[in-house]
Amino acid sequence: MIHLIPRPAFYEEKYGEFVLNSTTAVYADPPLEAARDYFVQSIEKACGIRPAVVVSDKAAIRFLYDVRLPKEGYRLECTSERIIVQASSHAGALYAGISIRQLMLAELMDHARVLTMHAVVIEDKPRYEWRGLLLDESRNFFGPVTVKRLLDMMAYHKLNVLHWHLTDNEGWRIESKKYPELTEVGSKRKGTQTKAWGKKDVEWIPYDGYYTQAEIKEIVAYAERLNIMIVPEIDMPAHLGAAIASYPELSCRKLPMEVPILHSDPNCSIIACAGDDFTFKFAYDIIDEMASLFPAPYFHIGGDEAPKKEWKKCPKCQAVIRKYNLKNEEELQGYFNNKIALYLKRKGKRLIGWNEVLKAEGLEHSVIAQYWTPLKDPRVADHLRNGGSAILSKHEAFYFDMPYAMVPLRNTYRFEPEQLGLSNRNDDILGVEGTLWTEWIMTQERLDFQTYPRLEALAETAWTPASQKNYAEFKERLVKFLPVLDKLGITYCPSHMWDPSLWRRLRVTTKFHVSDAHCEYRRALTHYKWKKKKSK
């Protein structure tokens, strides 16, 4: 068994063992030098050994540029004398170095003098080009240290997209120079809903936090070194409560409101006016600002859960419906989405929206649908047949904020597009993405619990060919990997909670929605206390 997560596309174990120490020389062809430097620095950070960087291509470890290999793929051959990495890109060489690090168990070798690696041949490439994770910081804000820690772990598992949900009803978390009230007002709320969807308990402690543009630029650059693209999500026309509290003229009725505290607050149903020029000026200005911070060729606008009751009563919205012969308010949202999509297209970016954006006819073909809804949506298959693209985030497999009782680990690992009525061979499926919504995730420890080891299962689903996947074998590798998470201080979900019984699933799911969103996590806390006591 090879101890790599995600499992490579092909590997063959050989006879022999390579030994790395501080005199081991490492060379890279010029296009791969940044990946080599990351490899050397990460080995030193993990265990204290710093291999020697040299300019000789006779070094024991060599990163060689080979244009014949896939964009993010690599070939790795380890013998007792040398390790040869071949890659056509920084990404491929980076991932080869990470595979070497995992195989040497570098994170477990504190102050070691040598690291060893069994001889092996690996030929590897990703299954999907989009291997993503969403982090919601509107509901709860975590800050740069937590985000960088998450980026490090994403890279360690060969994930390459951070979908950053920075705005919603409960908070606006990114500085705007043109609209300063977005953070002066929109980043603050009077309290936080704490208990469950079915409860209205509020902790009345003022809450705020946002990223400056300088912090954003620094984090984007940090991610780029790890081959991680950051895609911002600025929700519109719905989930815009914090922005409307900052600029009431965005709404149909132009009435002042506060940043919502309760996730079911009636003000959460107030959305941007689709008939007012100011709405589009605001949207275009924000896109311009965000485009200067995020170079990714994608921009997420959400587009989901948009109540239309305000539009039904709004003279300006109704005037647009009449002017463009739209059938109803659903088509008005299609009009809204297309205007934003075409503006983004002129900026060299593609619009991404949750699959509800497909409800309107005549949607711009460049739009990417992110498929999250629990039930099959035939519109997604139609969108793909008509030349559109999709990212798959099936609720029962990839909603990591949910209890393991609702989203067991096996669901994440065993996901295949056929579960959504889509072809496994469809090239227009860009990839898969896990989501970390944070309505009930308020601490780093809780974030860890919800994320790990789901992140490992997501990574293998996104990277490894379906023919190479086996859940029982994956769990064997995962259990051997847990000491690495322990060493990194990650409070992952205990193994006995990964795949609960049917009885526990029903019981916890009911409590989660009705009365206690933290019941499963509290059970894990008992395990952590026992584990800590046992280790003393």
Image: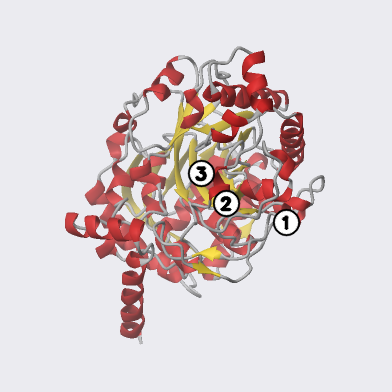
> Disc 2 to disc 3, how far (Cα)?
12 Å
- Which element type, helix, strand or loop, lies under badge 3? strand
- Which element type, helix, strand or loop, lies under badge 1? loop
> Disc 1 to disc 2, how far (Cα)?
57 Å
> CB under 8 Å between callouts 1 and 3?
no
Horizontally, residue 530 falls left or right of residue 264, namely left
Residue at 34% over, 83% down? 535
**In the image, residue 370 lies at what x, y percent?**
48, 34
Residue at 79% over, 51% down? 180
Residue sticking out furthest to the top: 325
Q: Which residue is mark 1?
A: 185
Q: Which residue is mark 3?
A: 85
Q: Which residue is mark 2?
A: 59
The mark closer to the camera, 2 or 3, is 3
Residue type, label 2:
Ala
Which quarter of the picture shows residue 71? Answer: top right
Residue type, label 3:
Val
Which quarter of the picture shows residue 342? Answer: top right
> Disc 1 to disc 3, how far (Cα)?
51 Å
Q: Is residue 88 visible?
A: no
Horizontally, residue 432 falls left or right of residue 242, namely left
Horizontally, residue 193 falls left or right of residue 30, namely left
**In the image, residue 184 lies at what x, y percent?**
75, 57
**In the image, residue 252 lies at what x, y percent?**
67, 36
Residue sticking out furthest to the right: 178
